[in-house]
Amino acid sequence: MATLAGAQTTPYAGANVWRTVLEWLTTVDHKKIGIMYLWAAGAFGLVGMAFSLVMRTELAQAGTIISAETYNSIFTMHGSVMIFLFLLPVGAAFMNYSMPLQIGALDMAFPRINALSFWIFLFGGALLAMSFAVEGGTASAGWTAYPPVTLDTGNNAEPPGAGMDMWLVGVILLGQASIFGSVNFLVTIFKMRAPGMTMWRLPLFTWTTLVTGLLILLSTPVLAAALVLGFIDRNGAEGAFFDPANGGQPLLWQNLFWFYSHPAVYIMILPAMGIVSDVFGVFTRRPIFGYRSMVLALVGIGLLGFIVWAHHMFTTGGVFLPFFMGATFLIAVPTGVKMFNWIATMWRGSNVFPTAMLFSVGFLMLFLIGGITGVFHAAVPVDFALHDTYFVVGHFHYTMSIAATFGFLAGCYYWFPKMFGKFMNEGLGKLHFWLLFIGVNLVFFTQLLLGLDGMPRRINDYVANPGWELMNMLITIGAFVSAAGMMVFLYNVFYSLKWGERAGSDPWEGTTLEWATTSPPPAHNFDSLPEIRSERPLFDLRFGERLQDDPHYHVNNGHNGHGSGGGGASQPSESAREEG
Amino acid sequence: MAASAVPHKRVHPVRSFLVGDEPMTTGLWGIIFFIFSEIMFFAGLIAAMLALHSDTLLWEPTNGGHRVEGDHLLPILFTVLLVSTSIPMQLAAFAIRKGNRKAMLINMAIVLVVGTAFIINQYFEWEHADFGISDGPYAATFYTLTGFHGAHVIGGLVFIFAQWLRGLLGHFDAKRNTAIEAATLYWHFVGFVWLLVIFPLVFFLS
């Protein structure tokens, strides 16, 4: 197996470096595109992290090191890069790489459009990056780009320049890449499943890909509409959409923007949830608890995600508070179901804790804090008090930023052997986990406390109120500890690529189809597929015969919706393929 | 199992009308999802129009110009023309489902001619409008919505023209016609969105 995996990293005999480069530039293979997404998004993530270190250095003590304009530009680009160029594409990377393998497909439904998505994404990213070089610098209105800050109203001291337009166009391109990607994911899941892979047998990561795809498909175009209106507003319409001086409405932007950007939170966190679910399903040595309720919770989160956008706008006075407060509270229900199921899966499992599992458990802890502080915000009176303080910053970093990142890091450690045929180093992995876990909690829990103390967000200097300097210093220390953790990770990636221990095709005793092929998989993914009679085909392959004689097994896995094993689902009448 | 041994084809009238009775190809699934995303894009723009209209102090062009009204015939005429080209487009799809490439080409030619005429008329509407894009919410909305719709019409026409050329070269038959079905669905979408754009913009919102 090891020699086979080694042989496949060299595409063909006599390949030289330019051929390899050309092959990657022109590839339409979902695995290579996924890996390219991963490298590109990882690089952008490191850039985003560097921005955060600049901000933390500035805020470590009262007094200024960099100017307010520079600070505005840095925090704007930190948010934009982290969201549009790191979290969203990392999700796309795993969805590209793993989803077709998990459903036993040859490739995506539209491989060339898949490649097009990637290159549009890269071009959009380059456009954002290039805005550092233009007159007036980058966009500096925050990643939310609220007008009239984005406009030249005649009142702002330094009206935003070409960087703002590049930001708008860049994000339109990134959105277009997302939309093409989501069409691809959806059609692949609906049309390309292997025989026997019914919808109720999809691995949970594939289910999250499906729901995420729908969210992208229906919300991203609305962002595109907002962005083109913003662009026209700046270039020709002179504020007729968003500037009250010319009859526009600033709140219109906020409504359109959050109609995308709230679902976008779920677009970022759902793939991470899917990864964590799959990881729990493997390293607890148990089927995931409540598979169907997991799927329904996922769909519930997706649906509710569309009717809560205005909870970002409670203090504007322009939204109907009771509805959006109630709807936002409701989201705690499906999220709680998922939380319960993950914990119940670990309960009495034969848990093992390789780094991927550590990050998954870390995900639970971080997401718990993030989720509960989210319920605080859903309450209108609390939100009025905490709006635009560091409490908000701490909350959303806990959920969509750092919890999602932990999920994606779990995915890195989990799928790295599949992608490159080698394990990541476990010792370095554990060091990475603990540094990052301690670092991010130091940063974001302190930010929650700082926010309760009333420190506003998006400022480059502050009055040295009692405790503020100490807390800010702690946050800065935490940021650098986290960054050290990420450097360990970076070293681990290169170390493991070079010297990592060889992994066989199924190093974790996985349960889903991606472990049924070699590591890395051949271009056509599978030489042969095992029979698919449950959502854990590889488990059935390994233990099916032994369990067939176990009466307990059938009792536990009847048709009553547990969906937790192979027994009940192995009746032939249920294995008929669903026709799309 | 015995019952499902004989393939049982469910026939749904709407599905049958729109995409035929064959199993939908991946391409057709793709264009349907893509059209959903396009609908959401226009939903965003149209929502913006309604929001601006409901809350703005002055809807009329701020330079004293005149809104494009429904009282002269051309907008109505070309609206009827554009929307009715959904019929020849659908007839083209029907024709190729039966393998009749010639009828398909003729119907698509009608669509191409009328669609191009619509675009030319849009150009003259823009020429005649006595307000600029910066003259308040109505003006900006007018140019943005008709502009983006026009861009989609042009996109649809290019798509149909490319398939028309392929048809001339002898592509497409009763089994292989995904691109024609896709172009048809897209053209229906373009016509439908025009109704949502033109009626509020010209007739309802004042």
Image: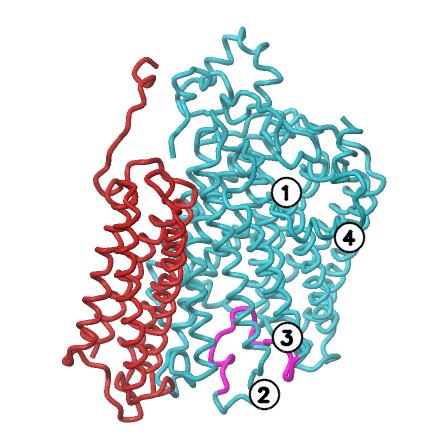
Instruction: Identify residue for label 1.
Output: A31
Looking at the rendered image, the quarter that the C terminus of chain A falls into is: top left
- Of the chain colours in the picture, the one used for chain B is red
Q: Which residue type carries mark 4?
A: Trp
Q: Which tag is nearer the camera, tag 2 or tag 3? A: 3
State which quadrant residue A350 falls in: top right
The residue located at (46%, 64%) in the rendering is: A383
Q: Which tag is nearer the camera, tag 2 or tag 4? A: 4
Q: Which tag is nearer the camera, tag 2 or tag 1? A: 1
Disc 2 chain ID: A
Q: How many discs appear?
A: 4
**Magenta stretch: residue A135 in it?**
yes
Q: Which residue type carries mark 2?
A: Glu
Q: Secondary structure at mark 4?
A: helix
Q: CA distance from mark 3 to mark 4?
A: 30 Å
| Mark sitting earlier along the chain (3/4) | 4
| Mark sitting earlier along the chain (4/1) | 4
Which is more toward the observer, B110 or A333?
A: B110
Instruction: Identify residue for label 2.
Output: A158
Q: Which residue type carries mark 3?
A: Ser
Instruction: Identify residue for label 4.
Output: A18
The location of residue B159, given as percent across then percent down, is 39, 58
Disc 3 chain ID: A
Same chain for mark 3 and mark 4? The answer is yes
The residue located at (48%, 36%) in the rendering is: A192
Q: Which tag is nearer the camera, tag 1 or tag 3? A: 1
The location of residue A291, given as percent across then percent down, is 48, 31
